Image: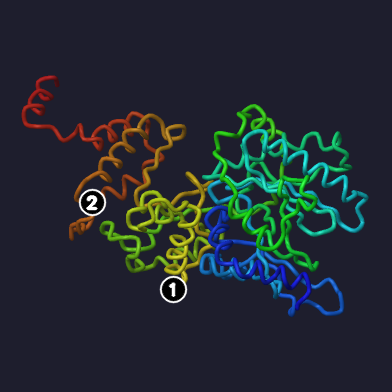
Amino acid sequence: MGSYFETMGQEWSARSKELADWAFAHMVNRTDVWGSYIAQKRRRSDGGRGMIFFTAPFSKARGKEFLTPPMLVRHFCGMDGSLVSLHSTSADKTSKWLAVDIDRHEKESATVEGNFAAALRWHDRLAGLGFDPLLMDSNGDGGYHVLIVFSEPVPTANLFAFGQTLISDFEKVGLAKMPETYPKQVCLEEGHFGNCLRLMGRHHTRDHWTKVWSGEPETGEPWLDGAAAVDRILGTRLASPSLLPVTPGLVEELVRQRPKTVVSRRRPRVCVDLDGVLAAYDGWKGIDFTGAPLPGAVEFTRALSEFAEVVVFTTRCAVEPHRDELREPTRPASDLAPRLVHQVRYWLEKYKFTFDDVYVGQGKPIAHAYIDDRAVRCVPQHEGHAAYSLAAARARDLCRRDRFEPPPAESADPRLYALIRAWPELPEDVRARIAETAGGKGEQSPRNRSKARRRR
């Protein structure tokens, strides 16, 4: 018969598929990045401080490799030490769970009893609010996790504020320092992934499997282990976001007080559209179809990269407009977005475009310039009132139904190019007359032309 540690491992391993499916559905906030622990056999045997943990996948593989349920199965089997940590915030700034991490490292003065008393207090407080919290012995030596899992993603800012309120009395309950909460930040800086927390199961350095508080201390053995612990986890009642107290004032205060990061000088950013600028486009043909590279497009991105960061910005990476094509009506956008981004990255790399990133955030990215076949320049502060008329004329042209038809064979009137070159030097009244004509008022019917002649 094996040791207690091996016996517990067998019980967790037997339920690894159930645990993986549950965790993937209810705890995975993003699949494009995750925390990964090196397998035991690949760690240094001399006790040195070699790399144990890293953010996976490595940067060159991001957008190509994703977290999958089989990886979580391996985690819950756990015997080789290939463990997984999950990020607490998704790319769209929501979170599926809140955790309080009460640590007790070897050099800390915290006691096992003191940590447990604090963890139990917050566990009971959450239960009193209607949640079904999990109180877990994370390392067998005074480290505890208190976890609540939600039925649907919650805005990260609200969840962080609630977590800070929950543990605000840490000194009164006897802790020397404030424990960490996940999510750790009220919001993420652009380009950052946030922090991740190790999934329940095997500890990454100790021979310990997670134990779960039963809530029944009168039984004499209130901690559940092995199969009983797994049953308690899988039976967790998912919390409704409506249970969260309303804390808008606190959220605003936390946002205001968050540390300002020191941003080093960086190159200007130029956002470039994909369809119609880099790739040939004559109408939407599906998320799996991208036109061929336009002549000179590859060289164009190379030239831009000499003075700026090149960021490809395309609606191809937006999940909601493409849900019908993805055939995933209910799956979170954070799970589907990486697939769309991967397709864009693959196309760009296939044709050897020069680019720094593919934008996947919400709304319009911050940039010094936007290059888009549907963009309309309008700078009335510098070009005066005529800028509006010119912009309206250009917008009307872009809204034509026949804009994708082949252009006429004849070349443009050379006088037009002369006008463009002379435009900055023209008087304001001349610009206004030209703009009025370009806006369509010059295209008069015979009746209107007759009226105009009579007015003269």
Query: Please, which residue is most extreme toward the front here?
Result: 219
Give the image location of residue 339, x and y in percent.
45, 62
Please tell me in which quadrant of the rendered image residue 159 appears.
top right
Quick one: SS at disc 1? Answer: helix
Quick one: SS at disc 2? Answer: loop
Above or below, comparing residue 300 to residue 119 in the picture: below
Residues at marks 2 and 1 touching, judged by CB atoms closer than 8 Å = no
Type of the residue with mark 1: Lys
| Residue drawn at 46 percent across, 34 percent down | 382
Q: Give 2 or 135, whichever is nearer the viewer.
A: 2
Above or below, comparing residue 204 to residue 137 in the picture: below
**For residue 19, side relative to residue 146 (left or right):** left
Type of the residue with mark 2: Arg
| Residue drawn at 25 percent across, 38 percent down | 438
| Residue drawn at 48 percent across, 44 percent down | 363
**Among numbered discs 2 and 1, the one appearing first in the sequence:** 1
Query: Please, which residue is most extreme toward the top here?
Result: 455
Above or below, comparing residue 152 to residue 70 in the picture: above
Label number found at residue 403: 2
Q: Which residue position is annotated with label 1?
A: 350
